[in-house]
Image: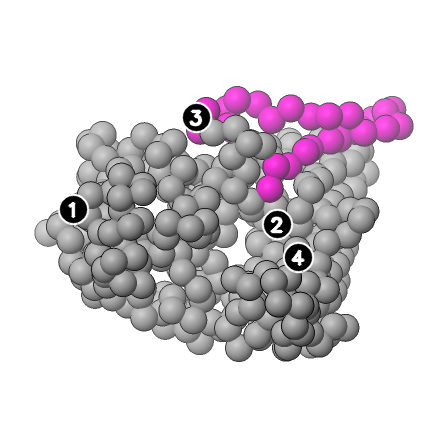
């Protein structure tokens, strides 16, 4: 008997497009508009067929702007649509569990943005539901799908740096600094689950683990140095209960030392730098912002008798979505490659993109190591 999951794989193998419905595709600069929309349009094999927003009127405005014919006022209507095979959940974290439940109960495959749940317990619940529904799932930990991360993974495995001795990550969160935009107040409230710890640090940790392996031990501290931020429109202070400093240290498989420091706001110096230091060489990834999953990344390396870093070009074999530019289309670039890898998984039976079970692993790694 064909299951919903096998039917999706059959659809991918047939060459017919997978119908996608996006929950949270707005008309005014939403994350889905900046990332998932261009990503879906750049990857052959997917077709955006439906969207839903907070109201029918809002959905119709968005549908008109983006050329999406089916616009629903509720997620339940979108999930019930026969033309939708994959539901993308791209809204604020506190709404993830209910929307994922709605999609899974309709028998649909789901891609849910990261953080998967508002804490480990919610993530575990969604993973249980997905197993029972027997449908493919994806969690939006896209850094590991970025071609620069994929090439770094290849270089390390191929012995470019020799034996890995240590790795260091320094990043800025962008938010959680001195000021906050009116649309971003929710990230300052720790109860909403989208914090410096879970979002930029969580994405970076997952990217590092995809290259160097899961930490065998890690100690994470989340520290509050700021207790408020100034709203950029009103000039009024907004309380901040989420930590604005995250530091972590531990050991990776084989004994390599790992250190991380994420700070709120932006730096006049380095906003993202990841070094991998080994017995034979060094690799360095940098970016203008501290979110590697949505930023243009620069890769440099040096080994052997070389005493300096030199630029390394990511081979075309790793850049699978030629319709997008890694700099001009940075917010969509890693997302698009995650969609491409998901297609590969469906067609080939592999498991390169992280699913809900992996989302649970990442939530657990953050919560169990937090001091």
The residue where tag 1 is placed is 83
Distance in Å between CA atoms under marks 4 and 3: 28 Å
> Label 2: few (<14), some or many (≥20) within 10 Å?
many
Q: What element carries label 2?
A: loop
Q: Residue 323 carries which label?
A: 3
Marks 4 and 1: CB-CB under 8 Å? no
Q: Nearer the viewer, residue 198 or 128?
A: 198
Q: Which mark is residue 291?
A: 2
- Please give left or right for residue 316 compared with residue 278 in the image: left
Image quadrant assignment for residue 202:
bottom right
Q: Is mark 3 on a helix, strand or loop?
A: loop
Residue 28 is a magenta residue: no
Percent coordinates x, y for residue 280 in the rendering: 80, 33
The residue where tag 4 is placed is 173
Give the residue displayed 53% in from the left and 69% down from the top: 186
The magenta region covers 295-322
Marks 2 and 1: CB-CB under 8 Å? no
**Residue 12 in sight:** no
**Residue 59 in sight:** yes
Residue 319 is a magenta residue: yes
Q: Is residue 201 above or below residue 123?
A: above
């Amino acid at each position: 008997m064909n299951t919903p999951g096998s039917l999706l794989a059959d659809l991918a193998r047939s060459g017919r497009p997978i119908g996608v419905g996006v929950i949270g595709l707005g008309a005014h600069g939403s994350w889905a508009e900046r990332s998932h929309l261009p990503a879906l349009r750049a990857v052959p094999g997917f077709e955006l067929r439906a969207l839903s927003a907070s109201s029918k009127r809002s959905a119709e405005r968005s549908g008109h702007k983006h050329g999406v014919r089916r616009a629903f006022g509720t997620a339940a209507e979108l999930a019930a649509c026969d033309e939708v095979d994959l539901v993308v959940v791209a809204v604020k974290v506190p709404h993830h569990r209910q929307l994922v439940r709605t999609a899974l109960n309709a028998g649909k495959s789901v891609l849910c943005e990261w953080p998967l749940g508002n804490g480990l317990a919610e993530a575990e619940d969604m993973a249980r539901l997905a197993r029972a529904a027997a449908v493919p799932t994806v969690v939006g930990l896209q850094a590991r799908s970025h071609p620069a991360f994929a090439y770094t993974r290849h270089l390390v495995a191929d012995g470019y740096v020799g034996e890995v001795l240590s790795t260091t990550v320094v990043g800025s969160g962008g938010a959680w600094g001195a000021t906050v935009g009116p649309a971003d107040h929710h990230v300052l409230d720790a109860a909403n689950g989208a914090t410096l710890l879970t979002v930029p640090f969580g994405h970076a940790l997952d990217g590092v683990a995809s290259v160097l392996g899961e930490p065998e031990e890690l100690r994470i501290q989340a520290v509050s140095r700021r207790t408020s931020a100034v709203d950029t429109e009103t000039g009024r202070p907004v309380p901040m209960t989420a930590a604005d400093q995250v530091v972590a240290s531990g050991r990776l498989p084989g004994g390599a030392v790992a250190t991380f420091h994420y700070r709120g706001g932006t730096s006049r110096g380095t906003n993202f730098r990841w070094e991998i230091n080994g017995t034979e060489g060094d690799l360095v990834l940098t970016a203008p912002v501290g979110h590697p999953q949505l930023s243009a990344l620069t890769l440099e390396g040096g080994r052997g008798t070389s005493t300096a870093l030199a630029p390394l070009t990511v081979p075309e074999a790793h850049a699978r979505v030629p319709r997008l530019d890694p700099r001009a289309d940075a917010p969509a670039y890693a997302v698009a490659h995650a969609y491409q890898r998901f297609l590969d998984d469906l067609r080939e039976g592999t498991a390169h993109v992280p699913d809900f079970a992996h989302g649970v692993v990442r939530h657990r790694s953050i919560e169990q190591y937090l001091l």
